């Protein structure tokens, strides 16, 4: 492969694999998660010569989950490469997970040769209709000269708010063919500026509220808005709760960070400001009792259609937070409300301390997490893959820095853990990485511990073995006896 640069554009000469990886280099992609398949051999050849790290796994779902986690940990595209047909379909759950999490995953798939298409070639399947509903863009690169431009456009789309996964498949005869073409320069993909009138409306609603609260979600993290969130919270003295990748945007020990008293919002809050997360099942579909709701999103298409909101600003979330803070004119004193929440938080944490310190036989999750908490550094990456066992981790394990808590997200797909763990060790080589698995979730991907061993990716794994599907067992007993 040869590569030259002219006026900000790189010109690549090689085969289709060279063109695809050259297109991703400008986005910072330095690793490829994959399971070997003949349809995509040129991508491996290109990776070896371009110095892109190849991490081969035991199941395509692990490759795609690792790429999703890389995106979550680095806020840039994560790359998975899979072979045609079953390679692509095996990766689809991870693509759906990335779609619901807003993660810029780039999945490149092999495809049966274009010259024999329709004759029943090996693993011949039209992937695009399957991927279209769970990606921002699903396309086939049909011309060797356009492979670089096609992959580059897909990665750019993945990073543009609202972020999400993209899919490109390349026919076998195209990816093996000589490819010469230009790679466009990487341009920033900023969100649109928020509507000043909606931002002002939000500020005007917060000012007189006596018991307001903020729920900070993953899109704040994707939008690099942690500092803007902190400025807003401290300016208006707002208690902040978090979900998903919103965890750690405010350190858990900040005086405005709360996590044990969210139930009070539905009973006592008069205004809930939801920033960068959908009004889905995790937030009671936007029903907070008598509280008014402000729903701020990074793209107008993310506004909730099923809930009544008092204001719905959309656009760059960092600018949005700063705009609300700039327009905030305090009318009400929030300190009494903060004291109420802090007292309730302290009571809840005190009760936890007793549970986390008490050994039992059989051991209980609270004690496991009590021991773990003592050993975690502030920048430890904690990964949850499971239902019942991991639900306790979400309650007991605190986050202090952005991007340090990874869970299956709103899609709730199990089997993420080993891929997430591999990605975390590569993206954060100097941090502790701890993977928490339910015994059910472990069954989806535990063999990929081999991947961790072969690639020398040290991770601590803790499996909570309750001998069953805990989240299903108890409801089944209650309903059916």
Image (tube, rainbow, N blue to C red):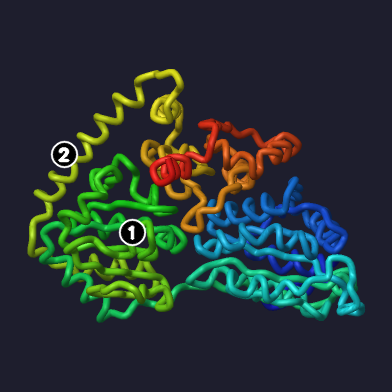
Q: Nearer the viewer, residue 68 or 347?
A: 347
Give the numbered dot on residue 283. 1
Residue drawn at point x = 34 percent, y = 74 percent: 306
| Percent position of residue 326, x then y | 22, 68
Answer above or below: position of 112 versus 57. Answer: below
| Percent position of residue 144, x then y | 83, 77
Q: Are marks 2 and 1 in contact (CB under 8 Å)?
A: no
Quarter of the image where the N terminus is located: bottom right
Crowding near the residue tagged with mark 1, few <14, some 14–19, many ≥20 C-alpha atoms within 10 Å: some
Quadrant of the rendered image containing residue 231: bottom left
Outermost residue to the front: 481
- At mark 1, the secondary structure is helix
Q: CA distance from mark 2 to mark 1?
A: 23 Å
Crowding near the residue tagged with mark 2, few <14, some 14–19, many ≥20 C-alpha atoms within 10 Å: few
Give the numbered dot on residue 470. none
188 left or right of 453?
left
Q: Which residue is mark 2?
A: 343
Q: Earlier in the sequence, mark 2 or mark 1?
A: 1
Residue 163: tell me if it is visible: yes
Q: Nearer the viewer, residue 343 or 263?
A: 263
| Percent position of residue 401, x then y | 42, 45
């Amino acid at each position: 492969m040869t590569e030259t640069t002219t006026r900000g554009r790189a010109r690549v000469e090689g085969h289709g694999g060279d063109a695809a990886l050259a297109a991703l280099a400008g986005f910072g992609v330095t690793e490829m998660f994959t399971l070997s398949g003949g349809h995509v051999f040129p991508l491996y050849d290109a990776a070896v010569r371009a110095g892109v790290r190849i991490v081969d796994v035991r199941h395509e779902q692990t490759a795609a989950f690792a790429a999703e986690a890389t995106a979550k940990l680095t806020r840039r595209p994560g790359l998975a490469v899979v072979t045609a047909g079953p390679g692509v379909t095996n990766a689809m759950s991870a693509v759906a997970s990335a779609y619901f999490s807003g993660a810029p995953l780039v999945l490149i798939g092999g495809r049966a040769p274009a010259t024999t298409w329709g004759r029943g070639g090996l693993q011949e399947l039209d992937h695009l209709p399957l991927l279209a509903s769970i990606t921002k863009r699903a396309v086939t690169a049909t011309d060797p000269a356009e492979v670089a431009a096609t992959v580059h456009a897909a990665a750019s789309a993945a990073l543009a708010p609202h972020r999400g996964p993209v899919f490109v498949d390349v026919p076998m005869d195209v990816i093996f063919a000589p490819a010469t073409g230009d790679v466009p320069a990487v341009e920033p993909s900023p969100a649109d500026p928020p509507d000043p009138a909606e931002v002002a409306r939000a500020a005007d609603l917060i000012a007189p509220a006596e018991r307001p609260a903020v729920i900070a979600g993953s899109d704040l993290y994707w939008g690099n808005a942690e500092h803007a969130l902190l400025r807003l919270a401290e300016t208006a003295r707002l208690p902040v709760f978090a979900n998903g990748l919103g965890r750690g945007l405010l350190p858990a020990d900040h005086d405005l960070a709360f996590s044990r008293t969210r139930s009070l919002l539905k009973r006592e809050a008069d205004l809930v400001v939801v920033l960068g997360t959908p009004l889905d099942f995790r937030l009671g579909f936007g029903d907070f009792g008598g509280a008014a709701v402000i729903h701020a999103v990074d793209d107008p298409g993310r506004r909730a259609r099923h809930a009544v909101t008092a204001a719905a600003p959309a656009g760059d979330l960092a600018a949005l937070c700063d705009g609300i803070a700039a327009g905030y004119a305090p009318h009400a004193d929030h300190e009494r409300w903060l004291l109420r929440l802090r007292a309730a938080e302290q009571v809840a944490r005190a009760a936890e301390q007793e549970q986390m310190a008490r050994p039992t036989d059989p051991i209980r999750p609270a004690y496991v997490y009590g021991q773990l908490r003592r050993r975690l550094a502030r920048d430890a990456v904690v990964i949850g893959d499971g239902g019942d066992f991991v639900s306790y981790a979400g309650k007991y394990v605190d986050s202090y820095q952005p991007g340090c808590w990874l869970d299956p997200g709103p899609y709730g797909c199990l089997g993420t853990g080993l891929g997430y763990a591999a990605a975390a060790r590569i993206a954060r080589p100097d941090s502790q990485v701890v993977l928490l698995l339910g015994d059910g979730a472990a069954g989806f991907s535990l063999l990929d511990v081999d991947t961790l061993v072969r690639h020398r990716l040290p991770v601590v794994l803790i499996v909570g073995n309750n001998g069953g599907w805990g989240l299903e067992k108890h409801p089944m007993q209650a309903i059916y006896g």
